[in-house]
Amino acid sequence: MLRQAVSLSLLAATLMAPLPALAQGKQDFTIVNRTGYQIDEVYVGPVSQRHWGEDVMGKDAIGDGESANITFNGGSKACKWDIKVVYNDGDESEFREVNLCNVSTVTLFWNRKSGTTRFVVQ
């Protein structure tokens, strides 16, 4: 996979502590890592954009079985977003057209041997 890192006007931040559902914006979500690998970078961009924004994890990582809250700080009313993760070995996976307005949790799965990725939403 090609690695893309181009500036985008998405303003997102991560919080490691849970937030009450009422305090969250309509696109805020929890990302759950069930890939079997550590995730070092997470990029979230609206489907309408061709370029990824900045790594919303900053210096943090999400170990296998761990989760992180992704909080949007305004700026976009889009519901469908693409999510790209970069694992600690540099491999990448992309999860397309996730409707963040209708979900609160996105659980990521990756099968490295078959090269398949999938996500489950709640």
Image: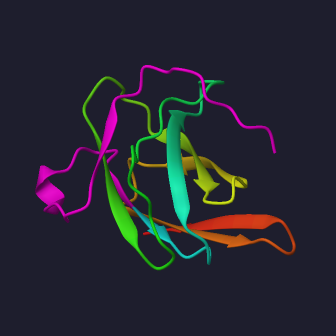
At x 26% / y 29%, what residue is drawn?
Answer: 74
Q: Position of residue 72 (x, y in %)?
A: 30, 38
Instruction: Please state the extent of the stretch shown in magenta in the rendering.
Output: 1-30
| Image color mode | rainbow
Q: Position of residue 77 (x, y in %)?
A: 36, 29
Q: Residue furthest right?
A: 114
Residue 104, quarter of picture: bottom left
Q: Position of residue 9 (x, y in %)?
A: 42, 20
Quadrant where the N terminus sits is top right
At x 79% / y 38%, what residue is drawn?
Answer: 2
Quadrant where the C terminus sits is bottom left
Residue 60, quarter of picture: bottom left
Q: Is residue 81 above or below residue 63?
A: above
Q: Is residue 78 above or below residue 107?
A: above
Is residue 25 found left or right of 2 in the rendered image? left
Q: Is residue 6 magenta?
A: yes
Viewer-closest of 15 and 74: 15
Q: Is residue 79 magenta?
A: no
Q: Position of residue 113 (x, y in %)?
A: 85, 75
At x 30% / y 41%, what residue is drawn?
Answer: 13
Is residue 70 found left or right of 17 in the rendered image? right
